[in-house]
Amino acid sequence: MAEGKKIRITQTGSPIGRTQDQRATLIGLGLNKRHRTRELVDTPEVRGMINKVRHLVRIEDDQAA
């Protein structure tokens, strides 16, 4: 992963009916409502969080800033 590389994630699914840890992961990513988008630094920690809720988010890789 390149230094300073960004990743854009958009929440596509609702946290209703999901487990508490999946809801907390979405909040940790800065998402709390559908169709909200956040741009985060691409780190292994962020990738792990995205992997946990991959069925609720859409991932778009951006070019390095």
Image (tube, rainbow, N blue to C red):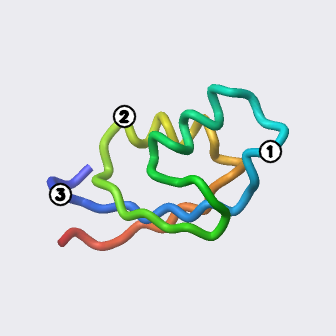
Instruction: Give the percent coordinates (x, y) of residue 45.
Output: 37, 34
Q: Is residue 54 above or below residue 49?
A: below
- SS state under label 1: loop
**Mark 2: amino acid:** Glu
Contact? badges 2 and 3 (CB < 8 Å): no
For badge 1, the amino acid type reads Ile
Residue located 53% across and 54% down the image: 31
- Residue 21 placement: quadrant: top right
Q: Which mark is residue 26?
A: none
**Circle number at residue 45:** 2
What residue does disc 3 label? 4
Task: Rate crowding at label 2 as few (under 14), some (14 to 19) or many (20 or more) other CA atoms within 10 Å.
Answer: few
Q: Nearer the viewer, residue 55 or 25?
A: 25
Q: CA distance from mark 1 to mark 2?
A: 24 Å
Disc 1: which residue:
16
Judge the density around disc 1: few (<14), some (14-19), many (≥20) Cα neighbours within 10 Å: few
**Residue 9 horizontal/vertical position (percent):** 50, 61
Residue drawn at (35%, 36%) of the image: 44
Mark 3 Cα shell of 10 Å, populated few (<14), some (14-19), many (≥20):
few
Q: Residue at x 45, y 40 (%)?
A: 28
Q: Are marks 1 and 2 in contact (CB under 8 Å)?
A: no
